[in-house]
Image: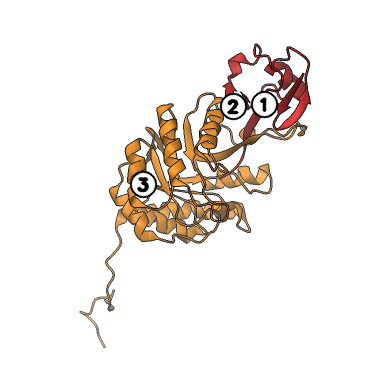
Chain colours: A orange, B red
Amino acid sequence: MQDDKLIIAGKAYNSRLLVGTGKYKDMDETRDAIEASGAEIVTVAIRRTNIGQNPDEPNLLDVISPDKYTILPNTAGCYTAKDAVRTCQLARELLDGHDLVKLEVLGDQKTLYPNMVDTIEAAEILIKDGFKVMVYTSDDPIIAKHLEEMGCVAVMPLAGLIGSGLGICNPHNIRLIKENARVPILVDAGVGTASDAAIAMELGCDAVLMNTAIAGAKKPVLMASAMKKAIEAGRESFLAGRMPKKAYASASSPIDGTFF
Amino acid sequence: MKIFLNGEAKEIIDSCTVMDLLTEMDIVGQRLAVEVNEEIVSKSRHADYSFNEDDKVEIVHAIGGG
Protein backbone atom coordinates (compact mmCIF):
# COMPACT_ATOMS: atom_id res chain seq x y z
CA MET A 1 0.00 0.00 0.00
CA GLN A 2 3.07 2.22 0.26
CA ASP A 3 2.94 2.82 -3.49
CA ASP A 4 -0.78 3.62 -3.51
CA LYS A 5 -0.50 7.39 -3.52
CA LEU A 6 -3.11 10.02 -4.15
CA ILE A 7 -1.78 12.37 -6.85
CA ILE A 8 -3.30 15.84 -7.05
CA ALA A 9 -1.85 18.42 -9.43
CA GLY A 10 1.34 16.38 -9.69
CA LYS A 11 1.94 16.07 -5.95
CA ALA A 12 1.76 12.69 -4.18
CA TYR A 13 -0.02 12.21 -0.87
CA ASN A 14 -0.16 9.16 1.39
CA SER A 15 -3.47 10.10 3.03
CA ARG A 16 -6.73 9.92 1.12
CA LEU A 17 -8.57 11.87 3.78
CA LEU A 18 -8.81 15.65 3.41
CA VAL A 19 -10.24 17.58 6.30
CA GLY A 20 -11.71 20.97 7.03
CA THR A 21 -10.87 23.14 10.01
CA GLY A 22 -14.31 24.64 10.74
CA LYS A 23 -16.65 24.17 13.70
CA TYR A 24 -14.06 23.02 16.26
CA LYS A 25 -14.29 24.10 19.89
CA ASP A 26 -10.89 25.77 19.88
CA MET A 27 -7.49 25.73 18.22
CA ASP A 28 -6.25 22.86 20.41
CA GLU A 29 -9.10 20.62 19.34
CA THR A 30 -8.56 21.67 15.71
CA ARG A 31 -4.89 20.74 15.87
CA ASP A 32 -5.49 17.43 17.68
CA ALA A 33 -8.27 16.33 15.32
CA ILE A 34 -6.28 17.19 12.19
CA GLU A 35 -3.31 15.33 13.61
CA ALA A 36 -5.42 12.25 14.43
CA SER A 37 -6.99 12.23 10.97
CA GLY A 38 -3.59 11.82 9.33
CA ALA A 39 -4.74 14.30 6.66
CA GLU A 40 -2.08 16.04 4.60
CA ILE A 41 -4.42 18.44 2.80
CA VAL A 42 -6.41 20.77 5.03
CA THR A 43 -9.04 23.29 3.98
CA VAL A 44 -9.34 26.82 5.38
CA ALA A 45 -11.73 29.70 4.78
CA ILE A 46 -10.73 33.29 3.96
CA ARG A 47 -12.40 35.98 6.03
CA ARG A 48 -11.90 39.55 7.20
CA THR A 49 -9.30 40.05 9.88
CA ASN A 50 -11.30 41.09 12.91
CA ILE A 51 -10.55 44.66 13.71
CA GLY A 52 -9.67 44.95 17.37
CA GLN A 53 -9.13 41.21 17.70
CA ASN A 54 -6.72 40.19 20.43
CA PRO A 55 -3.39 40.11 18.59
CA ASP A 56 -2.14 37.36 20.91
CA GLU A 57 -4.87 35.00 19.75
CA PRO A 58 -3.32 32.21 17.70
CA ASN A 59 -3.69 32.42 13.95
CA LEU A 60 -5.04 29.22 12.36
CA LEU A 61 -2.00 28.99 10.10
CA ASP A 62 0.29 29.07 13.14
CA VAL A 63 -1.52 25.97 14.43
CA ILE A 64 -1.98 24.27 11.04
CA SER A 65 1.33 25.25 9.49
CA PRO A 66 1.69 25.46 5.70
CA ASP A 67 5.15 23.93 6.24
CA LYS A 68 3.51 20.75 7.48
CA TYR A 69 0.20 20.62 5.60
CA THR A 70 -0.94 21.45 2.08
CA ILE A 71 -3.35 24.29 2.76
CA LEU A 72 -6.43 24.25 0.57
CA PRO A 73 -8.24 27.60 0.75
CA ASN A 74 -11.92 27.31 -0.06
CA THR A 75 -14.46 29.74 -1.44
CA ALA A 76 -17.15 28.72 1.04
CA GLY A 77 -19.83 31.34 1.42
CA CYS A 78 -19.48 32.61 -2.15
CA TYR A 79 -22.69 32.78 -4.19
CA THR A 80 -21.24 34.33 -7.34
CA ALA A 81 -18.36 33.51 -9.67
CA LYS A 82 -16.94 36.97 -9.02
CA ASP A 83 -16.76 36.52 -5.24
CA ALA A 84 -15.20 33.08 -5.63
CA VAL A 85 -12.49 34.36 -7.98
CA ARG A 86 -11.74 37.27 -5.66
CA THR A 87 -11.48 34.92 -2.68
CA CYS A 88 -9.02 32.67 -4.53
CA GLN A 89 -6.88 35.64 -5.52
CA LEU A 90 -6.74 36.82 -1.91
CA ALA A 91 -5.89 33.29 -0.78
CA ARG A 92 -3.02 33.07 -3.25
CA GLU A 93 -1.63 36.36 -1.96
CA LEU A 94 -2.09 35.19 1.63
CA LEU A 95 -0.26 31.92 0.97
CA ASP A 96 2.65 33.47 -0.94
CA GLY A 97 1.61 32.27 -4.38
CA HIS A 98 0.26 28.83 -3.44
CA ASP A 99 -2.28 28.21 -6.18
CA LEU A 100 -4.22 25.07 -5.20
CA VAL A 101 -7.79 26.06 -4.31
CA LYS A 102 -11.12 24.47 -3.53
CA LEU A 103 -13.75 26.17 -5.65
CA GLU A 104 -17.32 26.10 -4.45
CA VAL A 105 -20.02 28.50 -5.55
CA LEU A 106 -23.22 28.01 -3.66
CA GLY A 107 -26.69 28.42 -5.05
CA ASP A 108 -29.06 28.26 -2.14
CA GLN A 109 -28.76 28.94 1.59
CA LYS A 110 -31.03 26.12 2.67
CA THR A 111 -29.29 23.34 0.77
CA LEU A 112 -25.87 24.91 0.10
CA TYR A 113 -26.25 23.14 -3.22
CA PRO A 114 -23.61 24.22 -5.74
CA ASN A 115 -24.55 26.72 -8.45
CA MET A 116 -22.92 24.96 -11.38
CA VAL A 117 -23.39 27.81 -13.85
CA ASP A 118 -21.31 30.17 -11.71
CA THR A 119 -18.96 27.36 -10.68
CA ILE A 120 -18.06 26.72 -14.32
CA GLU A 121 -17.66 30.45 -14.98
CA ALA A 122 -15.33 30.82 -11.99
CA ALA A 123 -13.36 27.68 -12.86
CA GLU A 124 -12.69 29.03 -16.34
CA ILE A 125 -11.35 32.35 -15.01
CA LEU A 126 -9.27 30.68 -12.30
CA ILE A 127 -7.70 28.07 -14.59
CA LYS A 128 -6.74 30.83 -17.07
CA ASP A 129 -5.20 32.74 -14.18
CA GLY A 130 -2.97 29.77 -13.30
CA PHE A 131 -4.90 28.31 -10.38
CA LYS A 132 -5.09 24.57 -9.76
CA VAL A 133 -8.77 24.09 -9.13
CA MET A 134 -10.32 21.33 -7.05
CA VAL A 135 -13.99 21.82 -7.71
CA TYR A 136 -17.05 21.10 -5.59
CA THR A 137 -19.87 19.92 -7.83
CA SER A 138 -23.29 18.37 -7.99
CA ASP A 139 -23.21 14.63 -8.63
CA ASP A 140 -24.05 14.99 -12.33
CA PRO A 141 -21.65 12.80 -14.37
CA ILE A 142 -21.86 15.06 -17.45
CA ILE A 143 -21.03 18.21 -15.48
CA ALA A 144 -18.24 16.35 -13.68
CA LYS A 145 -16.68 15.32 -16.99
CA HIS A 146 -17.01 18.86 -18.29
CA LEU A 147 -15.14 20.23 -15.25
CA GLU A 148 -12.36 17.71 -15.86
CA GLU A 149 -12.11 18.66 -19.53
CA MET A 150 -11.91 22.34 -18.59
CA GLY A 151 -8.75 21.56 -16.64
CA CYS A 152 -9.85 21.18 -13.02
CA VAL A 153 -7.23 19.10 -11.19
CA ALA A 154 -9.80 17.23 -9.09
CA VAL A 155 -13.57 16.91 -9.22
CA MET A 156 -15.43 16.70 -5.93
CA PRO A 157 -19.08 15.69 -6.10
CA LEU A 158 -21.29 15.99 -3.06
CA ALA A 159 -22.47 12.70 -1.58
CA GLY A 160 -25.03 14.54 0.53
CA LEU A 161 -25.71 18.16 1.43
CA ILE A 162 -22.89 20.09 3.16
CA GLY A 163 -22.92 19.46 6.90
CA SER A 164 -25.92 17.11 6.67
CA GLY A 165 -24.22 13.84 7.56
CA LEU A 166 -26.76 12.07 5.37
CA GLY A 167 -24.14 9.75 3.92
CA ILE A 168 -23.65 8.62 0.33
CA CYS A 169 -27.12 9.51 -0.96
CA ASN A 170 -26.62 8.47 -4.58
CA PRO A 171 -23.83 5.90 -4.85
CA HIS A 172 -24.76 5.14 -8.45
CA ASN A 173 -23.93 8.67 -9.60
CA ILE A 174 -20.67 8.71 -7.66
CA ARG A 175 -19.73 5.45 -9.36
CA LEU A 176 -20.65 6.83 -12.81
CA ILE A 177 -18.56 9.96 -12.19
CA LYS A 178 -15.59 7.85 -11.11
CA GLU A 179 -15.89 5.46 -14.05
CA ASN A 180 -15.55 8.28 -16.58
CA ALA A 181 -12.87 10.27 -14.80
CA ARG A 182 -9.19 10.75 -15.51
CA VAL A 183 -8.63 13.18 -12.63
CA PRO A 184 -9.04 12.32 -8.94
CA ILE A 185 -12.66 12.11 -7.78
CA LEU A 186 -13.24 13.10 -4.17
CA VAL A 187 -16.47 12.83 -2.25
CA ASP A 188 -16.90 16.25 -0.69
CA ALA A 189 -19.77 16.71 1.73
CA GLY A 190 -22.37 14.31 3.07
CA VAL A 191 -20.23 11.88 5.03
CA GLY A 192 -21.64 11.49 8.55
CA THR A 193 -19.82 8.56 10.05
CA ALA A 194 -16.93 6.20 9.40
CA SER A 195 -18.94 3.65 7.39
CA ASP A 196 -19.97 6.43 4.95
CA ALA A 197 -16.30 7.20 4.34
CA ALA A 198 -15.58 3.52 3.74
CA ILE A 199 -18.48 3.29 1.27
CA ALA A 200 -17.16 6.30 -0.67
CA MET A 201 -13.77 4.65 -0.95
CA GLU A 202 -15.29 1.26 -1.88
CA LEU A 203 -17.07 2.99 -4.75
CA GLY A 204 -13.59 3.73 -6.07
CA CYS A 205 -13.29 7.37 -5.10
CA ASP A 206 -9.73 8.61 -4.84
CA ALA A 207 -10.28 10.45 -1.56
CA VAL A 208 -12.86 12.01 0.73
CA LEU A 209 -13.06 15.55 2.04
CA MET A 210 -14.97 16.10 5.27
CA ASN A 211 -15.36 18.57 8.11
CA THR A 212 -18.58 18.32 10.10
CA ALA A 213 -18.47 14.52 10.38
CA ILE A 214 -15.38 14.98 12.54
CA ALA A 215 -15.95 18.38 14.15
CA GLY A 216 -19.60 17.58 14.88
CA ALA A 217 -18.90 14.23 16.59
CA LYS A 218 -19.18 14.03 20.38
CA LYS A 219 -15.46 13.22 20.48
CA PRO A 220 -13.96 14.84 17.39
CA VAL A 221 -10.40 13.60 17.91
CA LEU A 222 -11.58 10.00 18.25
CA MET A 223 -13.79 10.36 15.17
CA ALA A 224 -10.83 11.77 13.24
CA SER A 225 -8.96 8.57 14.04
CA ALA A 226 -11.99 6.46 13.05
CA MET A 227 -12.21 8.28 9.72
CA LYS A 228 -8.53 7.68 9.02
CA LYS A 229 -9.06 3.95 9.47
CA ALA A 230 -12.32 3.92 7.49
CA ILE A 231 -10.65 5.61 4.54
CA GLU A 232 -7.78 3.13 4.62
CA ALA A 233 -10.13 0.16 5.04
CA GLY A 234 -12.41 1.34 2.23
CA ARG A 235 -9.46 1.88 -0.09
CA GLU A 236 -7.97 -1.55 0.59
CA SER A 237 -11.41 -3.14 0.23
CA PHE A 238 -11.83 -1.45 -3.16
CA LEU A 239 -8.40 -2.58 -4.34
CA ALA A 240 -9.00 -6.10 -3.02
CA GLY A 241 -12.26 -6.41 -4.95
CA ARG A 242 -15.29 -7.61 -3.05
CA MET A 243 -16.78 -11.10 -3.43
CA PRO A 244 -19.85 -11.39 -5.61
CA LYS A 245 -23.20 -11.29 -3.84
CA LYS A 246 -25.24 -14.49 -3.92
CA ALA A 247 -28.90 -15.12 -3.21
CA TYR A 248 -28.26 -18.30 -1.20
CA ALA A 249 -25.79 -19.56 1.36
CA SER A 250 -22.43 -21.04 0.47
CA ALA A 251 -20.78 -23.05 3.26
CA SER A 252 -17.37 -21.83 4.35
CA SER A 253 -16.34 -25.19 5.85
CA PRO A 254 -15.74 -28.25 3.61
CA ILE A 255 -18.53 -30.82 3.29
CA ASP A 256 -16.01 -33.69 2.84
CA GLY A 257 -14.58 -35.40 5.92
CA THR A 258 -17.52 -34.88 8.22
CA PHE A 259 -17.72 -37.66 10.88
CA PHE A 260 -21.38 -37.23 11.87
CA MET B 1 -8.82 61.13 5.35
CA LYS B 2 -11.44 58.45 5.43
CA ILE B 3 -11.19 54.87 4.18
CA PHE B 4 -13.45 51.89 4.61
CA LEU B 5 -11.56 49.12 6.40
CA ASN B 6 -13.30 45.75 6.33
CA GLY B 7 -16.59 47.52 5.79
CA GLU B 8 -16.20 50.13 8.54
CA ALA B 9 -15.31 53.80 8.07
CA LYS B 10 -11.91 54.69 9.48
CA GLU B 11 -9.95 57.94 9.72
CA ILE B 12 -6.32 57.73 8.72
CA ILE B 13 -3.60 60.29 8.22
CA ASP B 14 -2.90 61.52 4.68
CA SER B 15 -0.22 59.52 2.89
CA CYS B 16 -0.87 56.54 5.18
CA THR B 17 0.56 53.38 3.56
CA VAL B 18 -0.64 49.81 3.85
CA MET B 19 2.33 49.12 6.10
CA ASP B 20 1.42 52.08 8.34
CA LEU B 21 -2.09 50.70 8.71
CA LEU B 22 -0.89 47.17 9.49
CA THR B 23 1.53 48.62 12.04
CA GLU B 24 -1.28 50.55 13.72
CA MET B 25 -3.38 47.37 13.82
CA ASP B 26 -0.42 45.44 15.24
CA ILE B 27 -0.65 42.72 12.59
CA VAL B 28 2.61 43.24 10.70
CA GLY B 29 4.18 39.92 9.75
CA GLN B 30 0.96 37.94 10.13
CA ARG B 31 -0.32 35.79 7.31
CA LEU B 32 -2.82 38.08 5.64
CA ALA B 33 -3.76 39.58 2.31
CA VAL B 34 -4.72 43.15 1.47
CA GLU B 35 -7.11 44.32 -1.21
CA VAL B 36 -7.90 47.92 -2.14
CA ASN B 37 -10.98 48.55 -4.28
CA GLU B 38 -11.03 44.87 -5.20
CA GLU B 39 -7.41 44.86 -6.38
CA ILE B 40 -4.76 42.87 -4.51
CA VAL B 41 -1.95 44.93 -3.01
CA SER B 42 0.90 42.42 -2.85
CA LYS B 43 3.21 42.20 0.15
CA SER B 44 6.08 43.73 -1.80
CA ARG B 45 4.04 46.92 -2.26
CA HIS B 46 2.80 47.34 1.34
CA ALA B 47 5.47 49.88 2.26
CA ASP B 48 4.90 52.06 -0.81
CA TYR B 49 1.17 51.87 -1.40
CA SER B 50 -0.68 54.92 0.00
CA PHE B 51 -4.44 55.06 0.35
CA ASN B 52 -6.78 57.52 -1.33
CA GLU B 53 -9.95 59.05 0.08
CA ASP B 54 -12.84 56.54 0.29
CA ASP B 55 -10.69 53.52 -0.61
CA LYS B 56 -12.39 50.27 0.19
CA VAL B 57 -9.77 48.22 2.00
CA GLU B 58 -10.11 44.57 2.88
CA ILE B 59 -7.63 42.74 5.10
CA VAL B 60 -8.26 39.01 5.24
CA HIS B 61 -6.73 35.97 6.88
CA ALA B 62 -7.33 32.23 7.04
CA ILE B 63 -9.81 30.85 9.54
CA GLY B 64 -11.38 27.46 10.16
CA GLY B 65 -13.55 26.24 7.31
CA GLY B 66 -14.51 23.11 5.42
**Tag shown at residue B56:** 1
Q: Is residue A49 left or right of residue A217?
A: right
- Label 3, residues with CA under 10 Å away: few <14, some 14-19, many ≥20: many
Q: Indicate the secondary structure of the residue bearing disc 2.
A: loop
The residues tagged by marks 2 and 3 sit, at their Cα atoms, a distance apart of: 31 Å
Is residue A54 depicted above or below A203 in this figure? above
Q: Quadrant of residue A174?
A: bottom left
Q: Amino acid at mark 2?
A: Glu
* Three-letter code for the amino acid on which mark 3 is drawn: Ala
In the picture, which quadrant includes the N terminus of chain B? Answer: top right
Is B6 on the left-hand or right-hand side of A248?
right
Where does label 3 land, which residue? A144
Pointer 2 residue? B38
Q: Are marks 3 and 1 in contact (CB under 8 Å)?
A: no
Compared to A188, does A45 lie above or below?
A: above
Same chain letter for marks 3 and 1: no
Q: Residue furthest left?
A: A256
Specify the subunit that label 2 lies on: B
Q: Chain of mark 1?
A: B
Pick whichever of labels 2 and 1 is earlier in the sequence: 2
Whether residue A67 is visible, yes or no, is: no
Q: Residue at x 63, y 59 (%)?
A: A218
